[in-house]
Image: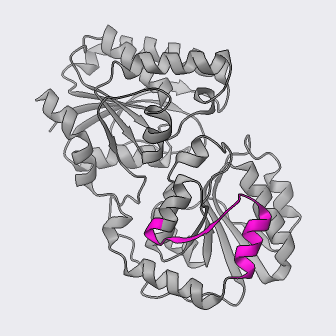
Amino acid sequence: MARILVFAFDLTEASQIRRIRSLKMLGHDVISAAFRRGNMNAQFTPDWANIDLGFVANESYGKRIIGILRAIRIVVRKRDALKSVDLLIARNFDLLVVAWAAKSLCGMRDVPLVYECLDIHGLFTKSGPVGAVMRWCERRLLARIQLLIVSSPGFVTHYFAAIQKYRGPHNIVENKLWFDGPLVARPKRREPGAVLALGWVGSIRCAPSLKVLMQAADHFGDRITLRIHGNVHRHAVPDFDDEIAKRDNVTYFGTYDYPTGLADVYAGCDLVWAQDLWQRGANSDWLLPNRIYEASWFGCPSIAVADTETGRKVAADGLGFTIDQPSAGALIDLLENLDRDRIEEISQRLLAMDDARFMLRPADIQDALTPVMQAGD
């Protein structure tokens, strides 16, 4: 058993909670040092020790810099509580800065540092001096980590290896379903409803996807229903409520409990829009979203853009359908030519696939951390 300090970007964010609980399930003693963003689960109270790093607003870069400096000061003041830590894990670049500072200032120079990257922020792929400075800063810290963990091979291929020239150790932990209680049962069989139901599930933050889906809804009228479930990032899609209100065939159902609410969410969907488009040409092309694993668990085929990592995964693994362009026209053409038998065929194929293809197991986390766990022994 190791004592692990996790530097977290948002204490109440669902994937962050899942990762910390997965470490606890492996028997590790986990402490977090976490910001709060206020995006979801506002009333959540952790069942592990946490160092509160304060509130940081979304997309407020100036405030984020202030937050990083404040976090370093807080962690340094709490250094007595960090004695005998065996491993540091930092989730995203902001927290990597804090973790590296803590390692340097709190007597943890020999403690392995893991950088876990779930997204490549737009600042790091930006052209011009700002992007160059951000990439330089990240390269300096990449040289000081002992392990990189990413959720998609596309991040290594197209960014860390190709752009940042990172050649150090890395592992991939896909953003699969996590159950810290009983498994949510998979259905035995699914049949499309009388009216085709297209779902958009998870973090609703992609303005280009909203546009594509609204145009498709307008084209099909009462031949389709668009069902939206999840946490809406209204700073990213400020016109979301107005767009939904304009259309009778589009419904926003709000947030849901994870993972217990997923069965009801996907039971109402014949297909799910799985593609992220808001950072086209960069992060959106490289990531693998949680929703492709969720949807597949419940036998719901995914739709993605063919030339993205998501689209390649969907095509290679038989998880659904791809379109050639991220446009309403391409989506409309696909849906116009899909018959219900084909949807049901893919659905049954998904339900016949092994659970392990879509579910993250404790052993997956342990295997990913093995290089630094062995180094720390």
Taking the view exactly as shown, the residue that stands out farthest to the top is 105
> Which residue is nearer to you in this view: 125 or 19?
125
Quadrant where the C terminus sits is: top left
- Please give left or right for residue 256 compared with residue 179 in the image: right
- Please give left or right for residue 88 compared with residue 74 in the image: left
Displayed quadrant of residue 324? bottom right
Is-magenta flag for residue 325?
yes
Quadrant where the N terminus sits is: top left
Colour mapping used in the image? one colour
Is-magenta flag for residue 181?
no
Residue drawn at x 27%, y 52% is: 364
- Magenta residue span: 316-337
Q: Position of residue 286 (x, y in %)?
A: 53, 46
Residue drawn at x 39%, y 49% is: 18
Taking the view exactly as shown, the residue that stands out farthest to the right is 246
> Which residue is nearer to you in this view: 347 or 235?
347
181 w.r.t. 377: above or below: below
- Please give left or right for residue 207 compared with residue 300 in the image: right
Displayed quadrant of residue 216? bottom right
Residue drawn at x 20%, y 36% is: 371
Q: Position of residue 184 (x, y in %)?
A: 39, 71
Q: Is residue 167 visible?
A: yes
130 w.r.t. 170: above or below: above
Q: Position of residue 101 (x, y in %)?
A: 39, 13
> Which residue is nearer to you in this view: 38 or 374?
374
190 w.r.t. 15: above or below: below
Q: Is residue 294 visible?
A: no
- Please give left or right for residue 131 compared with residue 333 in the image: left
**What number of labels is visible?**
0
